[in-house]
Amino acid sequence: MENPTGSVALYESLGYRIAERLPRYRKPF
């Protein structure tokens, strides 16, 4: 965990993209 903020940003981007492609798969952030 060198860049926590960067990791979070990446995870958020991936999460949003996944949510858009898979609306059924939604995780409460």
Image (cartoon, rainbow, N blue to C red):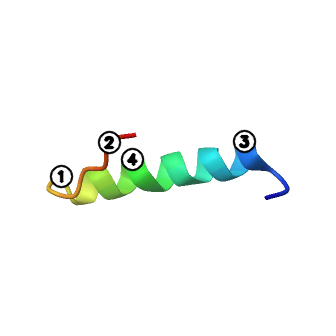
Q: Estimate how packed mark 2 is, as few (under 14), some (14 to 19) or many (20 or more) residues with alpha carbons within 10 Å.
A: few
Mark 3 or mark 1: name the one nearer the start of the chain: 3
Which residue shows up at 74% across the image and 47% down it? 4
- Asked if the residue under mark 1 is in contact with the one under mark 4, i.e. CB atoms within 8 Å, the reply is no
Q: Secondary structure at mark 3?
A: helix
State the residue position of label 2: 28
Q: Secondary structure at mark 1?
A: loop
Q: CA distance from mark 2 to mark 4?
A: 11 Å
Give the number of the mark in front: 2 or 4. 2
Mark 2 or mark 1: name the one nearer the start of the chain: 1
What amino acid type should be assigned to the residue bearing mark 3? Thr
What amino acid type should be assigned to the residue bearing mark 4? Tyr
Residue 23 bears which disc, if any?
1
Mark 2 or mark 4: name the one nearer the start of the chain: 4
State the residue position of label 4: 16
Give the number of the mark in front: 4 or 3. 3
Provide residue 22's location: percent of width, then percent of height.
21, 59
What amino acid type should be assigned to the residue bearing mark 1? Pro
Above or below: residue 18 compared with residue 8: below
Q: CA distance from mark 2 to mark 3?
A: 19 Å
Q: For the N terminus, which image quadrant?
A: bottom right
